[in-house]
Amino acid sequence: MTSVLSLMADPTRARLLYALDVVDELCVGDLALALSVSEDAVSYGLRVLRTAGLVKRRKEGRVVYYQLADGFPEPLREHCLRQLIVMSRAPVDEDI
């Protein structure tokens, strides 16, 4: 569980998981556009998540589509993604 939480602590990986939770399946280019990050950052994040068994891929021609793995711990995912949304809406302290 600690390793899953540490993977989700990275903002890009957390956002990737959220995007794949909202939409069943996306390719690297679509994820990069949706998250406003580089394709390299998306590819690296997906590689880490796939190595951990949290994301799986499906190849169609030259395009690779990613989706959440079947064994992803559902209650943990729901809780962490909900907290991510709450944190993203929190006001930013400008004194920091």
Image: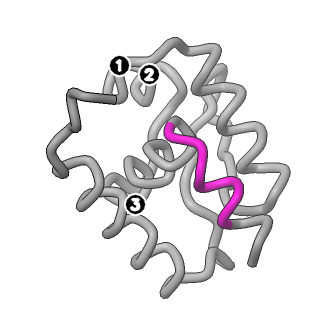
Residue at 56% of width from left, 15% of height from top?
39
Say which amino acid is labelled 2. Answer: Ala
The image quarter in which residue 58 lies = top right
Magenta residues span 5-11
**Is 89 left or right of 71, judged from the image as shown?**
left
**Which numbered circle lies on residue 21?**
3
Across and down, in percent, residue 49 comes to 71, 49
The reply to whether dot 2 and dot 1 touch (C-beta < 8 Å) is yes
Tell me the residue that label 2 is attached to: 32
Circle 1 crowding by C-alpha within 10 Å: few under 14, some 14–19, many from 20: few
Say which amino acid is labelled 1. Answer: Ser
Say which amino acid is labelled 3. Answer: Asp
Q: Quadrant of the C terminus?
A: top left
Residue at 63% of width from left, 74% of height from top?
72
**Which numbered circle lies on residue 36?**
1
Tell me the mark number nearer the camera, choosing from 3 and 1. 1
